[in-house]
Amino acid sequence: AVFLAKHQELSERTPIILGGHDHEVYVEEVGNSMITKMGVDGEKIGVIDIWWTESGERKTSISVLPCEEFPREPKAEAFAVEKAKGLERAMSLPIMELKQAGSTKKVRFEESYIAKFLLKYLKYSLFDRKVDVAMIQAGAVRASADYEPGDFILG
């Protein structure tokens, strides 16, 4: 947004930046743009109005509403339920065998057997591309769960 504010043409044409993944609702004016993020899991809906006054001044109004204030759309809901069932089936399939117990409860703070286990297989899968190192952001391995030896499932 700071870059956009400095760009002569774009600063006038970018009144809103719709943010992506975030855990909190975020609405802030930066430069000439409003940055909006509606939080996690579609729990909040952002209603954004942009208009210009007769004198050409741009105005913006942002309302944050709970998703329950909007009626469900039956076709969209049926589609989402169908896709969720398919995803649930796929996530329950074993993808490899875990040789020892491990945990992801402290993966952001200390070494994790589970993270090393997953990265080892990621690295092996990229062997033909001559990958020497595999790294992953700890937030991607944060189920906060304990795992026993045996089948390791995707979910």
Image: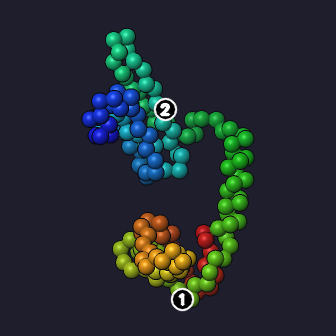
Q: Earlier in the sequence, mark 1 or mark 2?
A: 2
Q: Say which of 43 and 1 sits in front.
A: 1
Residue 88 lies, in percent from the top left, at: 67, 63
Query: Distance from label 1 to label 2 (Cα)?
Result: 49 Å
Q: Position of residue 20 (x, y in %)?
A: 46, 47
| Color scheme of the displayed model | rainbow
Q: Nearer the viewer, residue 4 or 34?
A: 4
Quarter of the image with the C terminus is bottom right
Residue under label 1, please give it: 100
Task: Report the residue marked by disc 2.
Answer: 47
At 51% from the left and 74% from the top, the residue drawn is: 129
Is the residue 52 above or below the residue 107 in the image?
Answer: above
* Residue 97 horizontal side relative to residue 104, left or right: right
* Residue at x-position 44% and y-position 70%: 136
Left or right: residue 35 versus residue 100 is left
**Residue 96, quarter of picture:** bottom right
